[in-house]
Image (cartoon, rainbow, N blue to C red):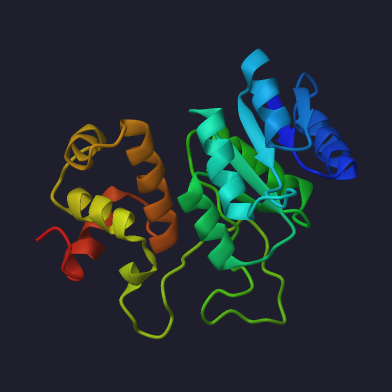
């Protein structure tokens, strides 16, 4: 595995480098303290994954994710942050990340998140602090199966962005990723990312369950 770590703090880069060496002893790591250095690294080296803390100087965190997404092309991005916010995690994915990892997570949780990203999946921590109905007395940062549906009877698809609702509606009509990409004028890879995110957010196990839920709530009719 070849990884790029983008983090303004050297001690955080060192910690992630050590962790990656435990996950994969053959891992080679490049480091960058800002987006300019990241661009320089990516122009010279092929990477399998980018791990970034978006708290960089002179740029808003979500803008940093979007900028790195533009720089990294198809290379998956895992956001590694101190922020235990469900909303921020979802916004990071919408901005182009394939994973959101809380820095205080266990080494095993981080390993699983990285493996999921490398396998083409979306990885989000379960039960982050501002999840509706969450018990604030529990940290709940394990990588357990997550359901981000509302616990108060509201429409479960309301957690989705407009673009995700478009994708879900097309899933409900039976369209596959290539067909969805043609309709929405996005790449099949982007569709795959949206589908993985939708399944995670709705807490369903496959496209069929997502389609049934979509039709129940008026999408894809």
Please state which of residues 192 and 140 is positioned toward the viewer in this rendering.
Answer: 192
Please state which of residues 49 and 52 is positioned toward the viewer in this rendering.
Answer: 52
Taking 138 as reference, is 74 above or below it?
Answer: above
Please state which of residues 140 and 94 is positioned toward the viewer in this rendering.
Answer: 94
Residue at the image point whose x is 62% and y is 30% from the top: 49
Where residue 133 sits: x, y (%)? 53, 82
Q: Can residue 4 be seen in the rendering of this structure?
A: no
Q: Residue furthest front?
A: 58
Please indicate whether residue 190 sits to the left or right of residue 114 in the image.
Answer: left
Quarter of the rendering containing residue 11: top right
Q: Residue furthest right?
A: 11
Q: Can residue 170 be seen in the rendering of this structure?
A: yes
Where residue 217 sits: x, y (%)? 20, 70
Quarter of the rendering containing residue 89: bottom right
Please state which of residues 52 and 206 is positioned toward the viewer in this rendering.
Answer: 52
Q: Residue furthest left?
A: 221
Quarter of the image where the C terminus is located = bottom left
Quarter of the image where the N terminus is located = top right
Taking 35 as reference, is 172 above or below it?
Answer: below
Q: Residue furthest bottom?
A: 152
């Amino acid at each position: 595995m070849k990884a790029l770590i983008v983090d303004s703090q050297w001690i955080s880069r060192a910690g992630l480098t050590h962790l990656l060496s435990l996950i994969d002893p053959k891992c080679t790591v490049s480091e960058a303290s800002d987006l300019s250095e990241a661009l320089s690294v990516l122009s010279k080296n092929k990477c399998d994954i980018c791990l970034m803390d978006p708290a960089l100087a002179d740029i808003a965190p979500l803008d940093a994710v979007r900028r790195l997404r533009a720089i990294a092309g198809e290379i998956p991005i895992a956001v590694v942050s101190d922020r235990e916010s469900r909303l921020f995690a979802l916004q990071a994915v919408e901005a182009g990340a394939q994973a959101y990892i809380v820095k205080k997570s266990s080494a095993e949780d981080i390993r699983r998140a990285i493996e999921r990203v490398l396998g083409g999946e979306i990885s989000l921590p379960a039960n982050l602090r501002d999840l509706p109905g969450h018990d604030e007395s529990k940290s709940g940062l394990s990588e357990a199966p997550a359901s981000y549906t509302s616990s108060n009877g509201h429409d479960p698809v309301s957690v989705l962005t407009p673009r995700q609702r478009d994708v879900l509606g097309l899933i409900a009509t039976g369209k596959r990723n290539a067909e969805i990409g043609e309709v929405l004028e996005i790449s099949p890879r982007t569709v795959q990312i949206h589908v993985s995110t939708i399944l995670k957010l709705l807490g369903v196990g496959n496209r069929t369950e997502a389609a049934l839920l979509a039709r129940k709530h008026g999408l894809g009719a």
